[in-house]
Amino acid sequence: MFGQSRSQRLRGALAGTLGVGLVVGLGACGGSGDSDDDSTAKQSIDCSAFSSYGDLKGKKVTVFASIVTPEDKAYTDSYKPFEDCTGVDIVYQGDKSFETQVLVQAKAGNPPDIAIVPQPGLLKQLVATGKAVEAPAEVAANVDKFWGKDWKGYATVDGKFYAAPSGASVKSLVWYSPSEFKDKGYQVPTTLDQLKELSDKIAADGGRKPWCAGIASGEATGWPITDWMEDFMLRLSGPETYDKWVNHQIPFNGPESTAALDAVGAYLKNDKYVNGGLGEVKSIATTTFQDAGLPIVNEHTCSLHRQASFYAANFPPEVKVAEDGDVFAFYLPGKDAASKPVLGGGEFNLAFADRPEVKAFQTYLSTDTWANNKAKVSKGWVSANKGIDPNNLSNPIDKLAATILKDPKTVFRFDGSDQMPAAIGSNAFWKQSTNWITGQDTKTTVDNIENAWPK
Amino acid sequence: MLTAETNTAKIGLMLAAILLFAAVVGVILFVATLFRGRRADRWVAYAYLTPTLLMLLVGLVYPGLRTIYQSFFNAAGNAFIGLDNYKVIFTDADQLTVLRNTVFWVVVTPFVATAVGLLYAILVDKTKFESAAKALVFLPMAISFVGASIIWKFVYEYRPDQPNVKQIGLLNQILVWLGGTPQQWLVDSPLNTFLLIVIMIWIQAGFAMTVLSAAIKAIPDDIIEAARLDGVTPWGMFRFVTLPAIRPAVIVVLTTIGIGTLKVFDIVRTATGGQFDTSVVANEFYSQSFRSDNQGLGAALAVLLFLLVIPIVAYNIRQLRHSEAL
């Protein structure tokens, strides 16, 4: 090919002009993607509570969380009063793979302004990236005022306080059928021994097995057993030992762990107790955690199912979840009636920027005003914020959870596997629990987890 | 960060991306026309290749080197630990299970899938219903690995052996009809790994069948007729005529399925999530990197996978060239 014909050159020039023209054109229309839909009239919101935040018109705060449709709407709705009164624009983004994404974003240097972090372990990882910023003094003051000291501790890394708690869930619950209890004269147990007696009684009455359980959850298969074990660790060895265990100040294969897991085994690996209508012990491994409690209301093949407050959403809509309804939950009792350890979970608002509008929004999220606003627009949401008015909670199970959280006798402890290093909390603990339920003995199980602990 | 919230914004963003692509191509074409003279065609070739090379460098070579570098570091990626991650892969009990499963996958899948495909291709060759029969086996190729795994999860589904409880899994229902008791198929290792391999074979047999069938049809008729005149048995025909003639195609099929099998991730993740001792290298690499937060070990697993795939890829390309040269 020597030289080019006239038409070829013309075509080339044309292509070039087209290209350059397009690039310039694109540059001109860039940045017009963000549409504002603040058209909702400023309803009768009392803005006086927001005056301290100042005028934040034209400012923007990004929020990143694991909560997606439909639950995310309650979050964005609860931000509305703040947006309307201060003029700030809150951009909420939910992603199911939040846990991995937020780490990638933080490491790459483009984190969101605020991340709603559901685990203290992840919070520590995020702080370790060096991109998170300490909570402002106002937030710390609010947390001192509205939350217990333990909650503040979960968001404190190396003596520095980072994030105010947001939502909370109670995991120490046992689902049961109030009508069945009434018909057969069963009593809600108030000690661990009574729980055992009740299980024996249901098993002896025949017709059904007392418990049903399921731990299948994709790659997270096994997590419900970690909750069981934490609950028993908390009850048999007490909160102080529990904290040491979670922080690996005592080994995972020590006598306390073995006792706790064996105590769980007395229920879950007991052929007389499980797995109501779902098969033998091993069927726990392949029953999804969502399906596991349904036999209580559907086939009536079991009576008890230990699962957190959020399990309420798994029952079909026609099932009434209430103390006088088809299904409800009681507090998984402590060793005796006087002690009240509660295992739970929660989320934290971690900030990666300290611009005034981010600080202001963070402060708003740590107030009782926000907690009550959020409670009003949510279905199935509780906070450990002491300022929350139980009348704002929409359903009986949330009220129960709030009552448990507020009880002065309650000793709250955060889900241990959420605080352990990821190699344990979201890998070895799940995996070994799954192996345990399919036949591995307790000693091998705790030994394997101990060996997997990052050195 | 580019985020589009409304659908119009999303479509706008897509159109902008397409236009940007067109613009880049336009600029390259324009630049290419600027060269003239004796060496012009060479420069034109460079102009066309540069963007591809750049993207390969940024998107493949750099991350590849970075992964190799990372594999010598600890979980957090901040301390050099030499070959320790590789030592873990070859000594830790869990990791050895992962390697064992990968060996099962790589040894069983390509050979069985190719054998099934070959047998099927020979059986339906020149029969009346050939195209329909071929379409039937080829259909699973159209299903994604995730979709296929979900289908097979239902096949293996377990319901207890109790009155009023009906099996919903095909395999257990057949077992019950035959008088057996239902099994939890995906729980017992190493049987569960082989049941997962069945899914892969189900998908890949169609691919093997199509390629091999085409190769069989390309065998010159005179060779076959000559063999028939010599009174060859059907087995002899297969062993001494068909197989040698389609050997390059068989090797290409074997290696292609082999590469796909080494990288298998979707099936394991969807069907068991790597639980019950079913994890393989690609799945373990993901869970170590993203779930377990052990980037060093994750990177080492990725490098191992890379090292295992390379010889097969090289052999595959050589065979491909070889068969094209024929």
Image: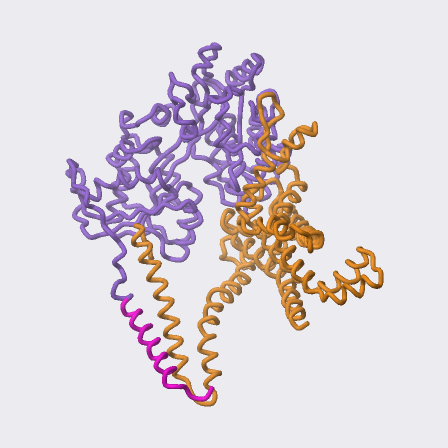
Chain colours: A purple, B orange
- In percent of width and height, residue A271 lies at 61, 23
Q: Quick check: A420 above or below B54?
A: above
Nearer to me, A21 or A56: A21
Q: Quick check: A350 above or below B159?
A: below
Q: Quick check: A93 above or below A240?
A: below
- In percent of width and height, residue A23 lies at 31, 69
Magenta region, residue range: A1-25
Horizontal side, residue B248 vs residue A25: left or right: right
Dividing the picture into quadrants, the one containing residue B260 is: bottom right
Residue at screen point 21% across, 40% down: A81
Residue at screen point 34% across, 65% down: B19
- In percent of width and height, residue A111 lies at 36, 53
Residue at screen point 51% across, 52% down: B289
Horizontal side, residue B137 vs residue A345: left or right: right
Dividing the picture into quadrants, the one containing residue A85 is: top left
Dividing the picture into quadrants, the one containing residue B247 is: bottom right
Horizontal side, residue A433 vs residue A366: left or right: right
Q: Quick check: B66 above or below A117?
A: below
The kind of secondary structure the magenta stretch mainly shows is helix
Camera sees residue B89:
no
Residue at screen point 20% across, 46% down: A38
- In percent of width and height, residue B129 lies at 65, 50
Labels in figure, total? 0
Camera sees residue B157:
yes
**Residue B301: in magenta span:** no
Nearer to me, A210 or A197: A210
**Residue A16: in magenta span:** yes
